[in-house]
Image (tube, grey):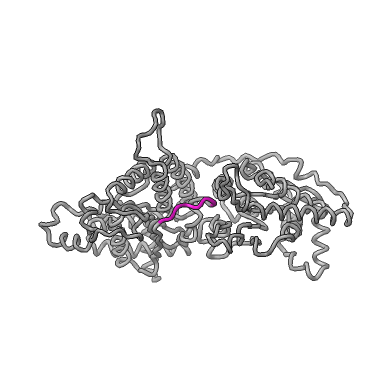
Amino acid sequence: MSKDNKNEAKELRITADPLSKFHMDEDELRLELVKAQYALRETRQQGQATGLLVLVNGMEYSGKGAAVTQLRQWVDPRLLNVEATNGTVPSHYEPIWQAHVTKLPRHGNITAYFGNWYADLIEGALLLMKQDKCDAKKDEGEEFEAWEIYLRQQLNLLAEFEADLINNHTKLLKCWFHIDEETLKYRIKDDKEDPEWLYHMDWQDKKKVKRFNKIAKVILSQQQDWVVIDGSDPEDVTENKVKKAYKDQGYNQEANLQFCHEVLHATQNALLSSQQHDSQHPLVSNISRNINAAFSWADVPDKLTDIDDPDMGKSDYQKALAKKQSRLAELLRARANKANQKGDSEANNHHVIFAFEGMDAAGKGGAIKRLVAPLDPREYQIYNISAPNQMELQHPYLWRFWKRLPEFSPNIKEERLSRIAIFDRTWYGRVLVERIEGFASEQAWQRAYEEINRMERDLAEKGTIIIKYWLAIDKQEQLERFEGRKDTPHKQFKLTEDDWRNRDKWQDYVQAAADMLARTNTKHAPWHVVATNDKRTARLAVLDHAIAQLEKVIKI
């Protein structure tokens, strides 16, 4: 980018024009869109890189495609990513947002996303309407029908997820396209139902359209951040040749212009946020602002400092190990077949996540090795988490972990694959190493406790079993293990200069661990501390806890 363009980008970072539609002609709008688009990309080099996600939702035939087509013609199409989904009934096993995280824009980019998680939500609500015969009158004393209870609950969860995106530098513009009954009737050119129609519903069926509009009313009334774009044909369309031409092509040019202006405003606000401290910007959610300015350190619990030092014999260890590994494998394989009392096996087809944290050389790798030994390698995935790469840094912090969460495959032959995820180091790095080394701002790592709790809650509420370990050893034991690695050729790769340097910050890590345990030890994802200098004792303790946690849910 030339020096002049960089200066223009800098100007856009501090200037927003919410009144652009009142004084810009189309040529001026096109120019400002391109300038803002390139300035947003430049945030990767200057300030805090910021992305923009444009959620495109609403009725079929309401002009969504025409509006995004117009936008793409006016901007640099190489820098505008477009994703789309018609919607599908949300999975029983995963949060509604999980299937969509790979579509999030890289910081510095803009993505227009048709359908998105709201299309899935609408599909789920429509299905409940059909199952519950929601058109019937509610029972006396009932405030909401089942579909509306579900819808409102999911909207609350999505609002929290979106707030976390905003706080982590992915800004949102939510556009809802709507048209009136006459326009919809005119734009449907035949009387045949199309199975590929949005939300897989027949838009010629007035009863179904009425149901959709009931859902839309709840969404738009509960979430105040939607921009409603009226794509209906103007009343004077028959008298205006230009408007008549647009009508014959199935869209409303005024709606297209409104959409492009909204994208311009959102891009300019994203640029503004990239130059401001998070808490100063109006797009930052209340969740971020509510963080206490004075962080309260937790007391260090005895279990982090009182380290056992037993010496388990090899024979006893191997005997106990084989028995525990057999039981663990039995439970993990049975989870997909366990049925509840009503015989619904799907409701108990659990994903499992093992999360390992601890001091360097505390034995995470050895514990994981014994954990997976009785399993088929196709039954699990192990993720060894290190520093994020460039692409990961240009997404929300949790994005690189969202992508690695277990997924359910509708293909029965692939059902086991990736259903168990094992993390050697985890999303807790933000409140541990990133906090101590200064890789995350105070606001970012202090906010992360609740962001992590919300993610784990969403997973647990869909049946995922989350088993978290903190492995603790004392400082002398760590030194002896470091020396052992240095002298053992096939273990030397485990030892780095950072490991030695981190010993000087031992107490900082102990305090960070105490703060983490105090703030993220929840009912749905509790921590288990294994504090021992004996590797064999630690490995058996890991297996014992995994078995105990699985037995609470899976009865065989």
Q: How many marks?
A: 0
Q: Name the quadrant containing residue 369.
A: bottom right
553 sits to left or right of 117: right
Viewer can see residue 456: no
Q: Name the quadrant containing residue 75.
A: bottom left
Residue closest to the eye, 476 or 238: 238
- Percent x, y of residue 43: 45, 61
- Percent x, y of residue 317: 85, 54
527 sits to left or right of 294: right
Over which residues does the magenta segment extend?
87-93
Residue closest to the eye, 428 or 299: 428
> What residue is shown at x 59% (from left), y 56% (from top)?
439
Q: Residue furthest front?
A: 343
> What residue is shown at x 44% (from left), y 62% (from top)?
108
- Percent x, y of residue 285: 45, 45
Q: Name the quadrant containing residue 393.
A: bottom right
Residue closest to the eye, 80 or 497: 80
Q: Residue furthest top?
A: 141
132 sits to left or right of 164: left
**What type of secondary structure mainly makes up the magenta span?**
loop
> What residue is shown at x 61% (from left), y 47% (from top)?
339
Judge whether 470 appears above or below 140 on screen.
below
Q: Is residue 54 magenta?
A: no
> What residue is shown at x 54% (from left), y 60% (from top)?
409
> In the rendered image, which quarter contains the N terminus?
bottom left
Viewer can see residue 125: yes
- Percent x, y of residue 32: 31, 62
